[in-house]
Image: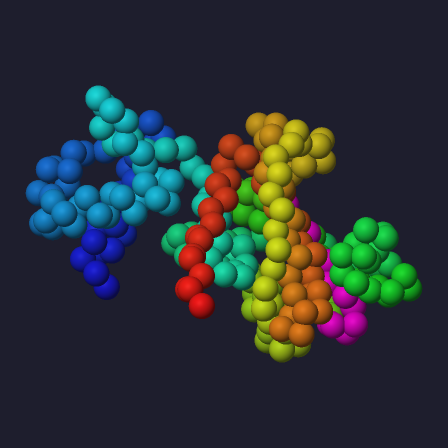
Amino acid sequence: MPLYEKVRLELRELVRSEYRPGDLLPTQTEIVHRTGASAITVKRALQELAREGLIESTRGKGTIVRRFEVADLHAGVSSWSESVSGFGEMPQTAWTKIERRTPPERVRNLLKIAPSAETFRIRRLRMVRGKPICLMINEIPAALIPEFNRHMLDCESLYDCLHRHFRLHPARADEDVTARESAANERKHLGAQAKVVLVVTRRTFLANRRPLELATVVANAASYRYQVELFNQPNR
């Protein structure tokens, strides 16, 4: 593990255990004395924490602790659980509801299934540190996951479960991100303070271009940050 990563983990634990949002962190010089690391290493560790959204530097004041928010980083086709785990958080599920149904026309068209075809609709309230973060709905053609049941959802990552039980793996995805006022039912689960929500709609495909799922994430915009990594295509 790189030294800056060790310092980052130490500082992250310090922020979570001893500081509240708005609190001022020690100066870089004080952190250097505390950790025994070089100024360059400490600066890199602080930059990584800022990238996670845990801290921010303010001119004339110093480095302060930001309010709690979840950073959902997308690099490739990754699940919500993988994105959250990548930032050192533990994804949790408050409740899960599964139903087999004949979906509305819009869903059928997006999943490219027949009018009589059925889907499994999986609804979950996802949490981090015991705090509700987002409502998640995944809709998958029943033909791809026959006899799916609650016992097969035996891990936090739905993609891991699909691979383990049905050997299904998403090859690509398209996403649409919008912000809007929350509905009463959404505030019931996310909290009254969730007046504005961020809605991420994703459609994933198998390697043969067949739609695998239609997923919707509804999160409190005040505590959810959507990040994407972009790469240049090599010249051909």
Q: How many marks?
A: 0
- The residue lying at 42 percent from left, 57 percent from top is 232
Image quadrant holding the N terminus, namely bottom left
Q: Position of residue 181 (x, y in %)?
A: 66, 29
Residue sitting at the far front: 236
Q: Is residue 119 above or below residue 185?
A: below
Compared across the picture, whether 61 is left or right of 150 comes to left
Q: Is residue 23 left or right of residue 228?
A: left
- Left/right of residue 32 with respect to residue 151 in the rendered view: left
From the image, which quarter does the C terminus lie in?
A: bottom left
Is residue 38 at least partly visible in the picture? Answer: yes
Q: Give the image location of residue 182, x and y in percent.
A: 66, 32
- 115 left or right of 13 in image: right
Can see residue 17? no
Q: Residue furthest top?
A: 60
* Residue 147: percent from left, percent from top: 77, 73
Query: In front here: 206 or 79?
Result: 206
* Pick the front one: 220 or 188: 220
Which stretch did the figure color magenta? 135-147
Depicted 36 relative to depicted 225: above or below: below
Is 143 magenta? The answer is yes
Which residue: 45% across, 61% down? 233
Front-most of 76 and 131? Answer: 76
- The vertical placement of 215 against 32, above or below, is below
- The residue located at (57%, 36%) in the rendering is 220
Which coloring applies here? rainbow
Please provide percent x and percent y for residue 89.
42, 52
Q: Residue at point 32% right, 41% down?
A: 50
Whether residue 139 is in magenta: the answer is yes
